[in-house]
Amino acid sequence: MNKPLIMTPGPTYVHEDVRRAMLQEIINPDVDESFFEFYKETGERLKKLLRTKNDVIIMSGEGILGLEASCASIIEPGDRVLCIDNGIFGNGFGSYVKMYGGEATYLKFDYRQAVDVNVIEDFLKKDRNFKAATLVHCETPSGITNPIADICKILKKYRILSIVDSVSAIGGEPLETDEWNIDIVLGASQKCISAPPGLTFLSISQDAWNAILKRKTPITGYYCNLSVWKSWYEERWFPYTQPVSDIYALRVAVDRLIEDSLRLERHRSIANAVRTALVNSGLELYPINGFSNTVTTFYVPKGTTFADISNMMLNEHNILIAGAFGFLKDRVIRIGHMGENCREDKILKTLYALDKTFEKLHINLRSKLYSSWQYVPPYNSHL
């Protein structure tokens, strides 16, 4: 049986060029001078993607490692941290704050809407005594993208460090790290980057480095300690042995994204077309606003279950779609249109299979998803 078409919001399909990169001969990254240069050059390419001049570090571990390392390295016992919470991941950030002794203050928003920047501004006018703030660029479970450009500029105005989880957004949503005054932005290999799971990467501003290196208390732990990376290139020393094959793959995947001048417009256009097809068919989107360009979340239609839909999609159409977790478990369906998944042929196969699945489960739609597809490919006038 052929491998299923992965239409989940990460991990995503990995292009053949990226898989081939992992076949390169293994070297010893601890002593081979060429690998120090390769790692540095890969970081420079990530800087282009993140639109930053800040230091970029690639770490061996899934995106959660970057999230935890940021909290471990910035937060000291007793530090007040503002957790901007409009979803499962935004809320979850608080657990890492508390894990390292910080005092988490949750600023909560409607979980079906993007964060309201004006509410943050009004809140900080009354209470601004925070060392850092945590926030999520794309709330993957709910399919909502938050206006981090405006949020981070406000945080910087009040001298609050920003720690941004952009795991599901980098590569598929606009991101201007330096222009938006983001102190730490972290991503992962398996989402829009479309590389194998297992790597996290993050950019660190000078303000963030100052907070990390001038702490009053030592950083708890080692693997999550970002300070050990500060002089890796000058000293030609990695804190631990690097996953050579994974970084080879990451380099090719990032290069593919950088060379794709239409990627942001394609993500936006396909996301709009997916939502339009769902709404025209009579299905209900979970978000009210702030719709993500990388993942669409909609309610399971009445009269069936997510398990029924998922099993039929896989067993009869060989397509993997996602549900969610936490309070959204069994309530919603998620289609990932990020990275290599963000291609019209894959989306059409998915919509056609959903039509057939709903028909077999006796779910009556107002119109077929496949026939409601209206997608205009982005056009580069400079080509």
Image (spheres, grey):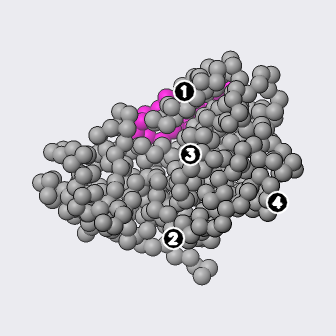
The answer to the question of whether label 2 and label 1 lie on touching residues, with beta carbons closer than 8 A, is no
The answer to the question of whether label 2 and label 4 lie on touching residues, with beta carbons closer than 8 A, is no
Q: Closer to the camera: disc 3 or disc 1?
A: 3
The residue beneath circle 2 is 16
Asked whether 124 falls inside the magenta stretch, the response is yes
Q: Residues within 10 Å of mark 3 (few under 14, many from 20)?
A: some
Rounded to the nearest angstrom, the CA distance separating label 2 from label 1 is: 38 Å
Q: Closer to the camera: disc 4 or disc 1?
A: 4
The residue beneath circle 1 is 95
Residue 239 in the image: state x and y as whole percent: 75, 43
Q: Where on the picture, by quarter, is residue 250?
A: bottom right
Rounded to the nearest angstrom, the CA distance separating label 2 from label 4 is: 28 Å
Among the two numbered marks 3 and 1 on one chain, the one whose residue lies closer to the N terminus: 3
Q: Which residues fall within the magenta stretch?
A: 108-130
Residue kind at label 1, given as amino acid type = Ser
The residue beneath circle 3 is 62
The residue beneath circle 4 is 33
Rounded to the nearest angstrom, the CA distance separating label 4 from label 1 is: 40 Å
